[in-house]
Amino acid sequence: MTNTSTHSEGLGKNPGVSALILSSLAGGEKHGYALVKDVAEFAGIQLPPGTLYEALARLERLGLIEALATEDRRRPYRLTGAGATALSEYLTTQQQVVKVGQSRLSQGWSFA
Amino acid sequence: MKSFMAASHRAERLVKFYPKIWRQRYGAEFVDFMEQAITDAPHDAKRTTNIISRSVKVRLGELGIAGPTLDTSNASRTALSTSTVLATVFTVFALFYWSSAMVSWNSNPRIATSISVSIWTGAITVSTMILALTLFLIGLSLIFHAVTRTFSKHEKKFVWPLVIVFVSATAILNSIHQFTRFTIARGGIQWTQLGIALKQVAGATQWVTQSTIWGPSWTGENSFSQGVLHIGTPIAVAASAFGVAKLIRLSEFSMTANRAGRWATKLLTLGMILFLVSFAGWEVAGGFSGSWMAPFTQMEKSLFFVIAFVALLGLMTSFKVRSHHNSIEVISSNDAAA
């Protein structure tokens, strides 16, 4: 059985937010606002600005994303190799959780 | 255009919740982000609350209390600076509680203080001395460093913090002088008899710290507790702590100074924890029982929880600088291995 906490540590604190950001950046480099719009589109979650920038700083510190040089105020971020690996491991764990949850629900769970 | 200008102003205001070092790194893109967010949804209380709460977290990180910091190269300086401010607040209260315990110790000629209370009073004395001496040495070395740099290398950055430290130190000394005038008028402290000297120092400390804690609201019950300098003692204590903290932030630390800074942070935390344990032990052992001293008021007891919280922040700072130091060592050893 895969250890969930180990994978969560791979994405740092608040792995859910990190996974959303990394998944968005997996589709190509984006700046903050484009990233929030993308996440809202594919996950229906509105990332608040304070949470977003806290997560961006954490992911950058962990080396999972990198900020690209720009002369504009809009700084794009890009997924790194380590970030792609961490996201892949996290999603594999989540898929396992989804699979187990769905199979147990289908095996006759009912309201008490 | 008008709404964009308004959005821009609001974005500029919101980014100011974050510390300077964060603004230098993320400020421009955050303002750009907020301009777009405000244009899309002008009023969002949840969004503002999120920014304020997260910026507090970032500020705590930059103060070396909790969470990560962007300014990793100055982590031990930051920790020392925060610990100095926290320990100064703590020490004022510690001196008040210590002086009360010391004045009460063996104060009743008919009932001798129990051995357990005497031992805990000793422990309170030691922990208070650790705090006061460490703070004194930190202040002295920083002032010496800053004065030397100002005069030998003409570094102007130290001038204002030095002025604040000297002015506040003058106010504190004036306050101490006002309250020791009674003792001085009666022949001064009898240093030849250690027990009596300790009681006299404790008596004067009790007056000064009561004045510092309660400030202008405290009447002081004597005619010397007047005057701008004297009434401003709480402000002066806070100003001196912030002045020294600023000097720490502005100073360039060598490897040795960094190590000393980490040790000083640990020593201040140790002093605070030791004091809390000793004071709790003193209370459990009987505290004021048998002495002529009135027990602590509800407010004075409540303040104990305030300083316990201050000590907790100090402990968090100490742990943070330790874990940061360890991670730097791991990175260094990995570099060496590579």
Image (spheres, coloured by chain):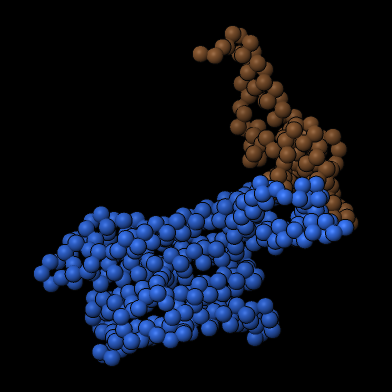
Chain colours: A brown, B blue
B289 left or right of B247? Answer: left
* Residue at screen point 75% across, 58% down: B10
Residue B257 can be seen, yes or no: yes
List x then y, in percent, for residue B151. Answer: 65, 86
List x then y, in percent, for residue B266. Answer: 48, 59
* Residue at screen point 23% across, 78% down: B196
Q: How many tags in the picture?
A: 0
Asked if residue B284 is positioned above or below residue B248 in the image, the reply reads above
**Extreme-left residue of the structure:** B110
Asked if residue B11 is positioned above or below residue B156 in the image, the reply reads above
List x then y, in percent, for residue A37. Answer: 80, 40
Please identify the quarter of the rendering in which residue B181 is found: bottom left
B285 or B145: nearer the eye?
B285
* Residue at screen point 45% across, 56% down: B309
B137 left or right of B35? Answer: left
List x then y, in percent, for residue B240. Answer: 52, 75
Residue B21 can be seen, yes or no: no
Q: Quadrant of the N terminus of chain A?
A: top right
Asked if residue B54 is positioned above or below residue A93 in the image, the reply reads below
B332 left or right of B211? Answer: right
B144 or B199: nearer the eye?
B199
B106 left or right of B231? Answer: left
* Residue at screen point 65% across, 22% down: A97
